[in-house]
Image (cartoon, coloured by chain):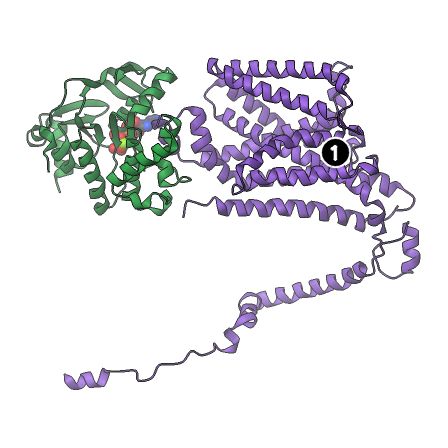
Amino acid sequence: MSDMHSHLAFVRTEMLAQQEPPIKEKGIVKWARSNLFSNWVNSVLTIVALYVIVRLIFSAGPWFLNGIWDTSSLAQCREILDGARGACFSVLSERWQQLLFGIAYPSDQYWRPTLAFVLMLVAAAPVLFVALPRAMLIITGLFPFVAYWLLWGGTIMTSVFVLIGVVVGYLVFTKAERFGFVLGLVAGLIAAVVVWKIGGAITPAVDGIMVLEPVASRDMGGFMLNMMLGVVCISLSLPIGIMLALGRQSHMPIIKGISVVFIEFIRGVPLITLLFVASVVLAYFFPPETNMDLILRVIIMITMFSSAYIAEVIRGGLAALPKGQYEAADSLGLDYAQAMRLIILPQALKISIPGIVNVAVGLFKDTTLVSVISMFDLVGMIRGPILASTEWNGVYWELYGFAALLFFVTCYSISQYSQWLERQLRTDHR
Amino acid sequence: MVDTTQMKVSDEIAISIEKMNKWYGQFHVLRDIDLSVYRGERIVIAGPSGSGKSTLIRCINALEEHQAGKIVVDGVHLTSDLKNIDAIRSEVGMCFQHFNLFPHLTILENCTLAPIWVRKIPKKQAEETAMHFLEKVKIPDQANKYPGQLSGGQQQRVAIARSLCMKPRIMLFDEPTSALDPEMIKEVLDTMVELAEEGMTMLCVTHEMGFARQVANRVIFMDQGQIVEQNEPEEFFNNPKSERTKLFLSQILGH
Ligand SMILES: Nc1ncnc2c1ncn2[C@@H]1O[C@H](COP(=O)(O)OP(=O)(O)OP(=O)(O)O)[C@@H](O)[C@H]1O
Ligand SMILES: [Mg+2]
């Protein structure tokens, strides 16, 4: 027994020092071996991909580096390049203002849309990042009115009266709500309209206050127009989409019916058709003297379109919640509005984030469709005035590449933000 | 331990159900249910699967609608009037088999949400109450975690604390322990026993017959949507009258 022990016993007398791993198991070599050359199919694919990348760099690189930035027409570019490969970026340096602001926006007023853009970032910040002080939401609330004044110009009193109307309407609504939700809504609306009418009557009298040079809707264009349509339509279609999704789940047949018909109808029609309706057909339905603004008509159509899609995305989120969540909320005595706002929607919206972002990004890019109804957004600018001009006829890659870059940066930021938000909201620890 | 089966029950009626009937489409789930629950009474409802136990207690706080008969809870007649329903729900606490905690809120927020929004209690005070009940169910240290980070037994105790924060006068339990591992069952049952000792009116669907013997002062046996037998636990277990009850008891106590 004891001698078996002596046979198996072991005591370490000196400790081993830490050693470097073998070279093939380290760093980039290991990474390349396991990711790029793990078997022969993988190796072939890697080599083909490398070849394509190198070819791309070798063809686009010189084109980009040879780029010319300071001529005044495509012909001059060609002259300077003299047959060599090279881009003619001069079109961007000469026409960037039109690409960003459209053809007719007064050039000494470019600071206005620029300021509106910066303010938009500030106004969006507290909505996007909960950590920021809640007081900043005041800026968010005032932003639409300030932005309208900045972009369209005229007296600030128009915005002020609209704002007062909204505030008065809201106050009346909160007071009248105890007599019933619908009654409150109607009373609030009437109060707001009364204020707007009074405001409309007073405005000419106080016309001199803080006047900016007015800019007509048809003079708006370029990427600014895409931004305006995208931001307004996305912000409007989210709440409308939520209401439609809840409406579709409602037990009240009328509300449910309206929601279903609306969603199914809008989803069954291409956006471009709706835009044509906005630009041509809608005029037939309104009396001739109500000359409704084209941008407003387009905003209504795009908003209707995207809210139908967002409604369906959110419906998916609502359906994914276990029935127990509704029952727990009910059993605690929360009423419908509280249960939705505090329990159901926070969870359903969280599930729906990828889908909502999908719709938002798609919608933002779809704003370029307005070029078809002869509005000069970024794409409309390129297809119309710029490519039609004698100086720049024939510059395609540079212009469309620039447009693609602007859209990519915006959409990629939205997507990155949404992924960050999803990580922030992950509390289920699955 | 106090033998709660001998605790005094007042003769004030907390819940009265008369000739209540319910259908799911053509299917007659609950048939002529007559039941009076006195304040402070602890009733255990047992019966085979599909006998309508869950449906019955869900009717009491109007999670399910009944089509015929009368339910009066705490003096309030249960009709389809939403005001009445919300009033009753805030007086009647309910615990579910699958806890149904709100996963996007912390434990503390789970417990303070309803008091703040339904009872309009200031946040600070609601948090104090919540901590008091979390201590009572012995998990005050988990207050700032999310439900997903807790074990099943802990989650069910949070669910009980969440209901208690509304200071309900009646508590309903629907198989609160049947989704739990054996060692967690005990911690949840202990909490419920404590609640019973304080004189809470309780209706509890459960298959824990030990709990029924220790705590209940009435056991109700249901089958096919009807109350087949009800009696004091001693009598019910030792001397069942109906054949259905005997069969059921031999099945669940058999092994
Ligand atoms: N929403 C519903 N629609 C149709 N039938 C239902 C619905 N919910 C329950 N039922 C039926 O009603 C009967 C009673 O269901 P209930 O859930 O009350 O039974 P239970 O006694 O609680 O059973 P268990 O012990 O399995 O929980 C069952 O036959 C069930 O199939
Ligand atoms: Mg059940």
Q: Chain B's shade in the image? A: green
Question: Which residue is found at the position 56% from the left and 29% from the top?
Answer: A239
Q: Which chain is purple?
A: A
Q: Left or right: where does residue B218 sit relative to residue A280? A: left
Question: Which residue is found at the position 24% from the left and 39% from the top?
Answer: B136
For the residue pair A11 and A175, the one nearer the viewer reads as A175
Mark 1 neighbour density, 10 Å: few (under 14) some (14–19) many (20 or more): many
Is the CB atom of the residue marked by disc 1 within 8 angstroms of ligand 1's nearest atom? no
Q: Left or right: where does residue B254 sit relative to residue A188? A: left
Give the chain of mark 1.
Answer: A
**Location of residue B116 in the rendering, given as x and y in whole percent from the top left corner:** 38, 29
For the residue pair A73 and A134, the one nearer the viewer reads as A134
Q: Left or right: where does residue B199 sit relative to residue B98? A: left
Q: Secondary structure at mark 1?
A: helix
Q: Quarter of the image holding residue A135?
A: top right
**Location of residue A385 in the rendering, given as x and y in whole percent from the top left corner:** 86, 39
Q: Quarter of the image holding residue A128?
A: top right
Relative to A161, is A424 above or below? below
From this viewpoint, is residue A327 visible? no
From this viewpoint, is residue A36 visible? yes
Question: Which residue is found at the position 72% from the left and 15% from the top?
Answer: A202
Question: Which residue is found at the position 24% from the left and 25% from the top?
Answer: B170
For the residue pair A418 and A30, the one nearer the viewer reads as A418
The amino acid marked with disc number 1 is Val
Q: Quadrant of ligand 1?
A: top left
**On-image quarter of the N terminus of chain A:** bottom left
Q: Left or right: where does residue A145 sit relative to residue B241? A: right
Mark 1 lies on residue: A370
**Location of residue A190 in the rendering, given as x and y in whole percent from the top left corner:** 60, 13
For the residue pair A388 and B53, the one nearer the viewer reads as A388
